[in-house]
Image (tube, rainbow, N blue to C red):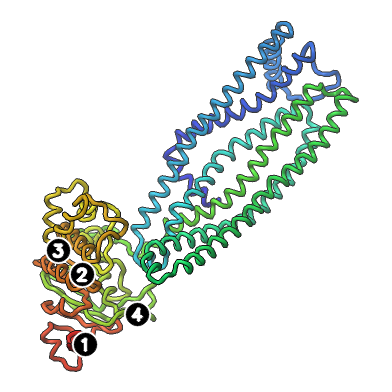
Amino acid sequence: MKTYYRLLAYVKPYWKHLSISMVCTILYALMNSLSIYLFIPLLDSLFQQGTKPAPNASPVKPSGQIQEMVNGVSAWFNHLIFSGDKIDSLIKICFIVIAVFTLKNVFGFLQSYFFATVEQGVVKDLRNQAYRRMHELPMSYFKNERVGNLTSRFTNDVNVLLTGVSLAFFNFIREPLSILLFLAIALSISWQLTLFAALILPFSMLIIGWIGIKLRSVSARIQEKMGDITSVIQETTSNVKIVKAFAMEDYENKKFKKETNALRKLIMRISLVRNTAAPLTEFLSISIGAVIIYFGGRLVLIEHSLKPSEFLVFIFAIFQMMPPIKELSSSHNRIQESSVAGERIFEIIDAKQEIAEVENPKSIEALKNTIAYDHVSFAYNDNPSELILHDVSFNVNKGEIIAFVGPSGSGKSTLVDLLPRFFDPVSGTISIDDINIKELSIKSLRALFAIVTQETILFNESVRHNIAYGMHDYPLEKVIEAAKTANAHDFIMEMPEGYDTIIGERGVRLSGGQRQRLSIARALLKNPQIMIFDEATSALDNESEILVQEAIERLMKNRTTFVIAHRLSTIRNASKIVVIEKGVVVQMGTHDELIKDESGLYKKFYEMQFRA
């Protein structure tokens, strides 16, 4: 129930709607029980002359003021119904029945409507908070979490949790109240028969508890399997070109069938367990109900201690208790399932924030002098025994171009990722103008940067919105100016709707060079002080590379630039080149200085690329 206690905080903003819904729930339950109780005067008006109890009737008698109130209400009601002849009584009871059932349905509608406002509001707020929290999580979180699993939490898990919210605040109020009211009716008629009927409850509770434990374990595996299936779909659709190129459709189909078959088996298991509760509860109910009918019939036919109308209403009341009991058993089981979904969502909200701001962070508006790496070391998961970077130190002055060269996996991208605090070093410091970047607000720090990577990230929106990312109603003239500077304007104008053309998810309708030029235009529009290029031209053909390189050179002008280069031709004019091997800086200098070192790693790279 810990998950549901946490949900109370999300319900609080909607307390007015919840209060109205709860009042309507109570009134609904009252009208529902009253609709059953009205059968006594109805049957009496049809088959008897009055409402006097049978001679030997012995219902439970309250005492004192309660007795007087009950007697007063009973006398008023009898006078209202039986003040005329039988036909008058029948007409009155018919109108009262219509009124009670009408009110019952009105209250039922209002209860459902106002509670829908609560549950949708709670789910919206929970989903929004989890999504907002996801954006605050460090990059290391996404390295360990599959996209499909995250997607499943925001879609499937939230919907499962919605069911639990509804049941917790709806069935756990209405159904117990209905049971109590029908129990009160039964007690008022015969406490002996009611006590006998209550024998069913302990059996039902035992069954409910046992099934709930079974459901919880299976439900957790179902949520995980849904995440697996979502991951397979996401991976296949993202890499559909590779699937088709390697003719792996059958392989992917078999993999997907394996996952869906595993999910089917789990769902069948949970369905078997879940559906066991209701039949078992009903079987016990009917068995005890049959015994009650036998003994109750004896009280009417032989002992004459119950009127036939009272006995019939008693039977109605007892059997009207069965649906709420069955609903409670089902609700308890579904709450066990939804609590697992809730825990998976709260895992995102509760995830450790590794990149945290200091209590009163400083704000930075501009780079004035120098960026300094001072004895920086880094390891994922803060494990010193698996360092990716070892004791790295260098300075970059404002306006300089610094390039990083080294074999794949040497730590070049990781080194640059530390600067905008995608990760934090395990030792050493990074400072901007002699201020440790950990003392700066993350928002103001990252506002200094624009990043262009090899894997261009675009969104399924128009060209204009991708260039002016996050800037609504930005002047089109400025967007066009940035596109021209990035060598993108010509191909954009050839598209069906120009700057309003939707480019597809991740820009799938564009070539690699076109996507890269759009990302450069986006960086230009941001007008950053510090640029980061992470192998931005390594995947392009020669013609595209020339256009992109021209755009990059314009973007680098008068800016401090960090370049991770696969092709050494792009960094010959860098102010400083840092050569990294296995996380260690092995060389540092200009191109002309490094090329003179015959035994250096840079010289070997250069000769490998330009030997021809």
Q: Which residue is mark 4?
A: 387
| Residue 168, image x, y percentages | 55, 43
Looking at the image, tell me whether mark 1 or mark 4 is earlier in sequence order.
4
Query: What amino acid type should be assigned to the residue bearing mark 2?
Result: Phe
Disc 2 crowd rating (10 Å Cα; few below 14, some 14-19, many 20+) is: many
Q: Which mark is residue 529?
A: 3
| Residue 533, image x, y percentages | 21, 70
Q: Tag 3's secondary structure? A: loop
| Residue 214, image x, y percentages | 64, 56
Q: Which mark is residue 533?
A: 2
**Of the residues tagged 4 and 2, which is closer to the observer?**
2
Q: Nearer the viewer, residue 255 or 583?
A: 255
**Residue beneath the point at 79% across and 11% down:** 49
Q: CA distance from mark 4 to mark 3?
A: 30 Å
Q: Tag 4's secondary structure? A: loop
Q: Which mark is residue 50?
A: none
Q: Tag 2's secondary structure? A: strand
Query: What amino acid type should be assigned to the residue bearing mark 3?
Result: Gln
Q: Nearer the viewer, residue 313 or 265?
A: 265
**Residue beneath the point at 73% across and 20% down:** 40
Mark 4 touches mark 2? (CB < 8 Å): no
Disc 1 crowd rating (10 Å Cα; few below 14, some 14-19, many 20+) is: few
**Of the residues tagged 2 and 3, which is closer to the observer?**
2
Q: CA distance from mark 1 to mark 3?
A: 34 Å
Q: Is residue 98 visible?
A: yes
Disc 3 crowd rating (10 Å Cα; few below 14, some 14-19, many 20+) is: many
Q: Is residue 430 visible?
A: no
Is residue 405 placed above or below 28 in the rendered structure?
A: below
Is residue 185 placed above or below 342 in the rendered structure?
A: above
Q: CA distance from mark 1 to mark 4?
A: 29 Å
**Of the residues tagged 1 and 3, which is closer to the observer?**
1
Q: Nearer the viewer, residue 390 or 483?
A: 483
